[in-house]
Image (cartoon, grey):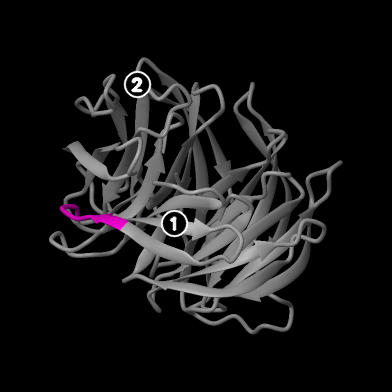
Amino acid sequence: MKRPNQAEFYVGSYSPEGEPAIHLCTLDLASGEMRVQSWTAGIENASYLAVNSVKNVLYAVSEKDEGEVYAFAIDPVAGSLTELGSRKTEGGAPCYVSIAPKGDYIFVSNYSGGNINVFPVNADGSLQEMSAQVRHAGVGVREDRQEGPHPHSIIPDSRGSRVLVCDLGLDQILIYNVEDGKLTTHREIELPPGSGPRHLAVHPTGKWMYLINELNSTVTVFTNNEQQGDLQILQHLSTLPDQHIAGSDDTGADIHVSPCGRFLYTSNRGHDSIALFHIDPATGLLQAEDWQSTGGRTPRNFAIVSGMLLAANQNSGNITSFTIDKDSGRLIPTGNELELPAPVCIKAL
């Protein structure tokens, strides 16, 4: 049970099916200390998680050759998980799951399968049969990473009338209309060749959207016209320091806007850092301010949890915690870390 001055979060990890895959952890908001409270096995490579708005259901993708998505009921007191069943995604390496604003559908992107899915949700949070699927086609300029489509994330807009799909292989954000669980193409947003669009973050005002590009370690700023379902590019800038000589292991991974809307953070694998950008409140444009080591290797994912930032370092098997300076947005290491095998997704409860 959560105590005062304590937050809870789930961690998804790359793990064999019989080993712990999803951990429920606690975060001490005074010290930044983290502890494992319980764990769940029975799902292989739980690489991305989503918790619904009423916090009674968690969804997790199983990133394997024949992908699946699982639903789990969340115990209201203990936070422990009880499986509600799973569905096949009909594509390999599902790497993202998101939930419609009303909680009536979930959306999945399959990285190696090149397809995206829609699943209706029952009243108890369990999943119905797939209601829609779209397979992308095409190639990008990078033969080593863009030999075909690779949808890496899929997020609904605030009204649930559209979803935005970042396809790393095609250098596109594809926008689909969602109606009665079906998808129709609305618009395609082109990114510079070789960018590798990965994840999106929406500003709290809804005015702007921010994209982390994996392959060239950049962030792209857009104006967000949700009513028209359109994005207009305002800015591209590097997520790495000017003095850093980028190598083949330097790839952008995750992106989040602070709840106050003043700061943007991105994670850099290879450089193993979290980049801090200040957001201009009038224009949404970014100014690079700082880079903080994550205290580990390969920060695939991070999360802002109750005013603190937690970084999941996949290859060093640890999660590190940081306080956030309220004035500057800079990250201050707490000195605490939690050892977990291959942590790759953090979601607050």
323 is higher (above) or lower (below) than 97: below
| Residue at which label 2 appears | 182
| Residue at which label 1 appears | 26
Residue lying farthest front? 4
Q: Nearer the viewer, residue 273 or 175?
A: 273
Residue 215: % across, % down: 51, 66
Question: Gap between marks 2 and 1, in whole Å?
Answer: 38 Å
Residue 44: % across, % down: 20, 57
103 with respect to 212 (left or right): left
* Displayed quadrant of residue 276: bottom right
Amino acid at pointer 2: Lys
Q: Which residues are magenta?
A: 38-43
236 is higher (above) or lower (below) than 272: above
Residue lying farthest right? 282
97 is higher (above) or lower (below) than 247: above
Q: Is residue 217 visible?
A: no
Residue 42 lies in the magenta-colored region: yes
Residue 290: % across, % down: 74, 70
Residue 280: % across, % down: 83, 49
* Displayed quadrant of residue 158: top right
Kindly identify the residue that appears in the image at 63 percent across and 27 percent down.
226
Residue lying farthest top? 180
Task: Tell which tag, 2 or 1, sits nearer the viewer.
Answer: 1
Q: Nearer the viewer, residue 59 or 139?
A: 59
Mark 2 or mark 1: name the one nearer the start of the chain. 1
Q: Secondary structure at mark 1?
A: strand
